[in-house]
Amino acid sequence: MALKSLQSVFKTELAKIKQLKMAAQFCRVVTDLPVPLQRYFEFCGYTGKECARAVTVDWESAWLKLALKGKWKKVVCTQINVLPQPVRLFYIRRKLLGVFPFGAIDEFMQNNSQMLIKLLNFFTVSHATGKEMDKAELVTILAETILIPAYALQYYITWKQLNPNCVKGTINYKGICASGLFYFGEAGQILSFETNDRYYTTKTGEYVQTRWLARVDSYRPHHGGNIPSAFATIWRRPEGDFEYFKGTIAAIRYTPFETFGVGAKPGAVNSRYISHPKLAFP
């Protein structure tokens, strides 16, 4: 069997996303959400009508660290999320020593997930799948409510306010369930998300359930609202907090949703965030 490059795998998965046929979206309204989430919608400038077909997160810059005491390495990231199904495609790549291609695809689509890592674009270093990956990918989508508040309106995510500055979110999709806590600041912004439903892979390949944190370090004005502009992810390991990814975000772009049911009409999205709808799929 011929070797398949990581880039061609990404293009194949992107084509699958484009071909997904989704039923019409029936979303909650913002007033159904706990008050801290309502304030977050207001802080971001969202109307609650952003139930879009696809969302592109434009990573302006990003860095990756492979070990607790390792050095930060600059990477290039491409991220596509799709609604209403929880679909996520994250493609990260860099050149080792400035020459040798190294990259990974992190994906959840149609109830299946994978983390595929390749060296020299062709040779598989790791290919993680299975129930632990499915749960981890799904809780990552829950965390990305920070970037894409429209996820908060989907019926497969439920919410419970624990105090004025903390909301518990639970995502339950086709038998996979995961949850985490969102922490809010005084201005209505989300400060961080924490969960126990992700798995750290040890050097021996063992999955160890480990507390995981997504942290927003700053926001920037965007189309009359605000979006996260600096973002980091951290493993809370026994030997110390391992911050392994950090990045800055230039923009978050929405593509209008189209339905495919019998007699369905294209779903309208009334949002100032749709500045370049044709560019959401690279």
Image: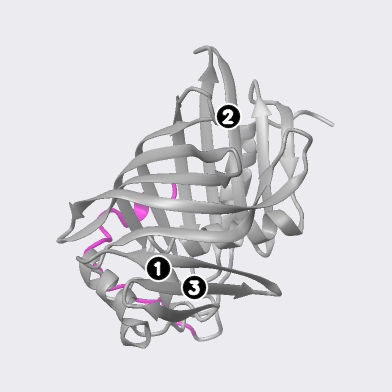
- Span shown in magenta: 264-282
In the image, taking residue 173 as reference, residue 162 lies left or right, namely left
Secondary structure beneath dot 2 equals loop
Identity, as a three-letter code, of the amino acid under mark 1: Ala
Q: Is residue 58 above or below residue 182?
A: above
Which residue is found at the position 55% from the left and 78% from the top? 156
Q: Is residue 25 above or below residue 236?
A: below
Disc 3 to disc 1, how far (Cα)?
21 Å
Disc 2 to disc 3, how far (Cα)?
30 Å
Name the residue that disc number 1 marks: 52
Q: Is residue 94 above or below residue 173?
A: above
Point out the residue furthest to the left here. 224
Residue 105 x/y as whole percent: 60, 41
> Which dot, 2 or 3, sits closer to the camera?
2
Identity, as a three-letter code, of the amino acid under mark 2: Ala
Secondary structure beneath dot 1 equals loop
Which residue is found at the position 71% from the left and 49% from the top? 208
Name the residue that disc number 3 marks: 169
